[in-house]
Amino acid sequence: MQGDQVMVRELADTFYSQEEAQAGLDNPTDTYDPVPFHQWVQEQYWTASGIKVEKIVF
């Protein structure tokens, strides 16, 4: 979060374990810049027609 805004940081690759995903989050070259959730969700309409979402519980 930044202030009172929820921020979304997308991973730039596919990771098959929690450890790999966390390493991706820790390495800024493996992520896209964070954006406020309200902005990110509006952009998903245009870009996510074939997306697969997987929940990772930390």
Image (tube, grey):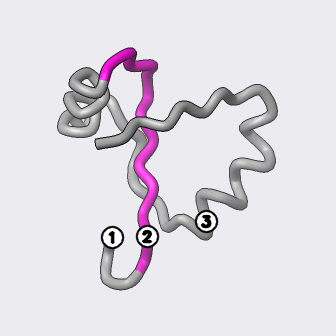
The front one of 57 and 41 is 57
- When asked about the image quadrant of residue 37, the answer is bottom right
The residue that appears at 60% across and 33% down in the rendered structure is 53
What amino acid is found at the position of numbered circle 1 in the picture?
Met
Q: Single out the mark in the foreground, 3 or 2.
A: 2
- Mark number, residue 1: 1
Image mark count: 3
SS label for mark 1: loop
Circle 2 sits on which residue?
Answer: 6
Confirm whether residue 31 shows in the render: yes
**Residue 18, position in %: x, y?**
29, 27
Callout 3 touching callout 2 (CB < 8 Å): no
Callout 2 touching callout 1 (CB < 8 Å): yes
Residue reaching furthest top? 16
SS label for mark 2: loop
The residue that appears at 45% across and 42% down in the rendered structure is 10
Circle 3 sits on which residue?
Answer: 39
Mark 2–mark 1 Cα distance, whole angstroms, equals 5 Å
The residue that appears at 79% across and 49% down in the rendered structure is 45
What amino acid is found at the position of numbered circle 3 in the picture?
Gln
Using a 10 Å C-alpha cutoff, classify the residue at mark 3 as few (fewer than 14 neighbours), some (14 to 19) or many (20 or more).
Answer: few
Answer whether residue 33 is magenta in the image: no
**Residue 49, position in %: x, y?**
80, 33
Bounds of the magenta span?
5-17
- When asked about the image quadrant of residue 1, the answer is bottom left
Mark 3–mark 1 Cα distance, whole angstroms, equals 14 Å
